[in-house]
Amino acid sequence: MIDARAVISPQADLAADVEVGPFTVIGPGVRIGARTRIAAHAVINGPTTIGADNHIFQFASIGDAPQDKKYQGEPTRLEIGDRNVFRECCTVNRGTTHDAGVTRIGDDNLFMAYTHVAHDCQVGSRTVLANCATLGGHVQLGDWVIMGGFAGVHQFCKVGAHAFIGNNTAVTRDVPPYVMAVGQPARPHSINSEGLKRRGFSAGQIRVLRDAYRTLYRRGLTLADAVTELTGLARQHAEVRPLLDFIGTTTRSLVR
């Protein structure tokens, strides 16, 4: 299961059925779960924990030091869940001591070729990052987020669950759940209705979320007044609650 030309540290811990291709390098402090496949020429450094059933393609760089000038070699880590796919030339960095010290990635994510996940990012589950999409440091990406090719998220920004970031979009402020954002800088375009349909949201739920979107973005309300109306809507429709909760946690302001 491990090619003889791979270089694996004695301090790495690999499950018995992990596959490792030729010329891959796995450093000390790396733990890799069952049935994970690693292609040729990948580099994985630790401290890094990788769960089960992941697939890491050739030339990916996983778990190396953060690209942060303040980083001085402190012990930080990367944690990756299960069933993720990292395509060719992906780069994922460990955390820094200027945050929680850890970069985290959930389950069932697809990172297409040349995507980058910077230090201290918190990525949920079932996200898709298309080719060359980039996350700056300390970014939070919710579940089911889709990022188009060459899209980028500025450091410390948050993108809520089920949001869609269009190709070549530059996210410089927080994108609420369910919202499709496009442009440079990113601006709200609509509700990600097609994505919601695919995930089992009913027509009625999507209609409610369209109303919530109009309240937030199309009626000319102040943010405080929009929050007041959304609070009432959330009492009747649970699907509005994630949107309302997200607004309460924004630190870089919302895309407007």
Image (cartoon, rainbow, N blue to C red):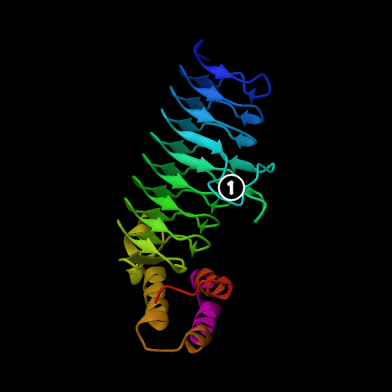
Q: Amino acid at mark 1?
A: Arg
View extreme (top): residue? 4
List x then y, in percent, for residue 90. 43, 38
116 in magenta? no
Instruction: Give 58 or 218, whichever is nearer the viewer.
Output: 58
Say above or below: 62 vs 237. above
Instruction: Give 198 or 168, whichever is nearer the viewer.
Output: 168
Instruction: Give 74 or 222, whichever is nearer the viewer.
Output: 74
236 in magenta? yes
What residue sits 36% from the left and 58% below the top? 195
Looking at the rendering, the stretch of residues picked out in magenta corresponds to: 229-241
What residue sits 35% from the left and 71% below the top? 187
Say above or below: 47 vs 126. above
User: What secondary structure do most residues of the magenta stretch adopt?
Assistant: helix
The answer to whether residue 41 is left or right of residue 81 is: left
Give the quadrant of residue 60: top left
Give the quadrant of residue 111: top left
The residue at which mark 1 appears reads as 104
Task: Give the quadrant of the C terminus.
Answer: bottom left
